[in-house]
């Protein structure tokens, strides 16, 4: 995915500097491609392969909170 994005941006830049017109589809695709970069950086260290669920109690009474806090390491 990264090399395709770099190649697309290089092509777009070279066409723009050569005076060739850019279509609306190319400009829209460029904007979407640029917006994916921060999303990929945010999700880069996303946890995966989680097999043990972390269950949260449904009862939020003060007694339940005390019991839950004692069991949490």
Image (cartoon, rainbow, N blue to C red):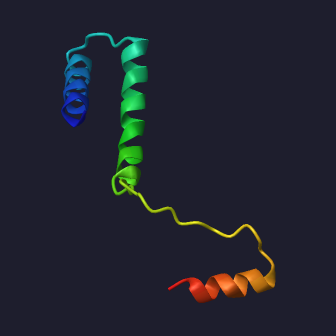
Report x, y in % for residue 46: 39, 55
Q: How many callouts does the rendering have?
A: 0
Residue 73, placed above or below residue 50: below
Report x, y in % for residue 24: 43, 13
Q: Nearer the viewer, residue 6 or 43?
A: 43
Residue 65, placed above or below residue 53: below
Residue 25, placed above or below residue 53: above
Q: Nearer the viewer, residue 29 or 70?
A: 70
**Quarter where residue 40 is shown:** top left
Q: Is residue 43 left or right of residue 10?
A: right
Taking the spot 32% from the left edge, 10% from the top edge, the residue there is 21
Quarter of the picture containing the N terminus is: top left
Report x, y in % for residue 29: 39, 23
Taking the spot 36% from the left edge, 17% from the top edge, the residue there is 26
Taking the spot 20% from the left edge, 16% from the top edge, the residue there is 18
Q: Nearer the viewer, residue 22 or 60?
A: 60
Q: Is residue 63 left or right of residue 55?
A: right
Q: Residue at the far right: name it.
A: 61
Q: Is residue 62 left or right of residue 7?
A: right
Q: Is residue 6 left or right of residue 28?
A: left
Report x, y in % for residue 61: 81, 78
């Amino acid at each position: 995915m990264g090399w395709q994005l770099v190649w697309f941006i290089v092509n777009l830049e070279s066409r723009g500097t050569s005076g060739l017109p850019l279509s609306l589809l190319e400009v829209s695709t460029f904007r979407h491609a640029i917006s994916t970069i921060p999303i990929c950086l945010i999700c880069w260290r996303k946890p995966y392969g989680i097999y043990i669920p972390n269950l949260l109690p449904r009862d939020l009474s003060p007694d339940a909170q005390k019991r839950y806090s004692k069991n949490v390491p």
